[in-house]
Image (spheres, rainbow, N blue to C red):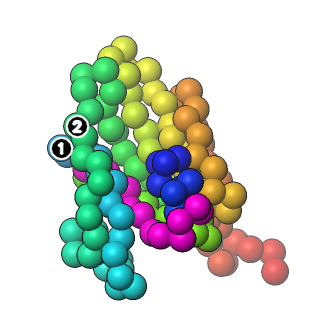
Amino acid sequence: MQMAASAAAETGRRYEIIIDIAEQSYGLKEIAGTEIYVDNPDETPGEIIVQNNLTESCRLVYVWFDDGIDTNTRAWFRVGPSGWQNGGKIVLYDEKEKPYTIVVNRINRIVKLEEGNIELLEPIPKNELPF
């Protein structure tokens, strides 16, 4: 993810990280053209640069996006020269079931690996805002 964010900032190109929790795999795609299919990364034009499976020592558990949506099947994060399209967290367990969180920050483009299942701020419903 850091490689994708750095490459996007340096080259001006866009990239997509595809996380398949069911298959315990991930891929990195360089997006070609201007069309991006929001609902299906398989339809987004581009070339898969990296495709890997995780091992028993690292297991994907779920992804939570900063708009309050979570998934335990498939997710993708897209990054371009201006940063991440969305932020969130990817929760993983090691072979001893110890949790780790990859935090994707859409505001400052930083991706960090943290020990534990880190809690992120959740969106507040409009009816709960004081203004």
Element type where label 1 sits in the image:
loop
Q: Does the magenta stretch include residue 6?
A: no
Query: Hey, which quadrant is residue 77 in on the image?
Result: bottom left
Q: Quadrant of the C terminus?
A: bottom right
Q: Could you tell me which secondary element the residue under label 2 belongs to?
A: strand
Q: Name the residue under label 2.
A: 53
Mark 2: amino acid: Asn
Residue 128 lies in what quarter of the image? bottom right
Question: Which residue is pictured at 74% across the width and 74% down the height?
Answer: 129
> What residue lies at 55% left-to-right and 35% top-to-bottom?
113
Q: In this view, does 34 lie above or below 111?
A: below
Give the alpha-carbon distance from disc 1 to disc 2, as whole Å.
8 Å
Reply above or below: 90 against 8: above
Callout 1 amino acid: Glu
Disc 1 vs disc 2: which is toward the camera? Answer: 2
Residues at badges 1 and 2 in contact (C-beta under 8 Å)? yes
Residue at the disc numbered 1: 23
Residues rendered magenta in the picture: 9-20
Is residue 122 visible in this depiction of the protein? no
